[in-house]
Image (tube, rainbow, N blue to C red):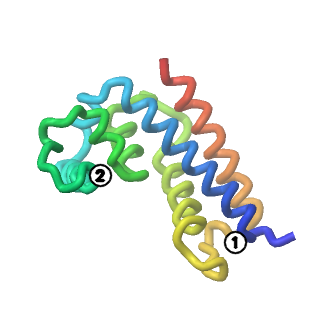
Amino acid sequence: MDLFGLHFRLCLLALTLQLEETALKLILQNPEASWDALPDKQKEKAKKTYRRWKGGSNGADRSPYRRLLSCTSFNDKDIIIAKRKLFGRDDMNITKVFQEAGTIRNYCAHTKPEDIPEAMSDPEALNKAVQDIQQLILRLDNACY
């Protein structure tokens, strides 16, 4: 079995997309506070992405926060969750899990199969990362009301 074959990489990518979607669901519960937690540079990137989706319109400044937050990056969602302290004091290092998930996501979505990141070359470490991502998805989902 090719551990890093297309089917396995697609499963890993789907897992990271589920993490991002669940994080978005959580931050959209209070979109204005989430938008305010985002650094200005990241806000500008989201507005630029929004304008591209809208076909060049400058309406991004007037658009609802929900639409702008949907244009944020994978890492932005981690920044918002951390800044808003949506988990308070937490035993799970959410940023570390997001970083691991980002590495997996980028490998699965953007790189050649032979460019396996160091973090993924150890099956035990990869298994732990997958378990951590699954646990975080459940916790994010449970935090949504």
Q: Residue at x 32, y 25 (%)?
A: 30
Taking the view exactly as shown, the residue that stands out farthest to the top is 145
**Percent x, y for residue 129?**
65, 53
Q: Residues within 10 Å of mark 2 (few under 14, many from 20)?
A: few
Q: Is residue 95 left or right of residue 97?
A: left
Q: Give the camera-side residue of 99 and 48.
A: 48
The image shows a total of numbered marks equal to 2
**Percent x, y for residue 8?**
74, 62
Residue type indicated by callout 2: Trp
Q: Which mark is residue 121?
A: 1
Q: Work out whether 100 lies above or below 111.
A: above
Taking the view exactly as shown, the residue that stands out farthest to the right is 1
Q: Quadrant of residue 38?
A: top left
Residue tagged 2? 53
Q: Which mark is residue 108?
A: none
Q: Residue at x 49, y 23 (%)?
A: 144
Q: Work out whether 25 lies above or below 10.
A: above
Q: Work out whether 80 lies above or below 143.
A: below
Q: Residue at x 36, y 42 (%)?
A: 70
Residue 132 seen by the camera? yes
Residue 41 seen by the camera? no
At mark 2, the secondary structure is helix
Q: What is the spatial separation of the Cα atoms under label 2 and label 1, in whole angstroms?
A: 37 Å
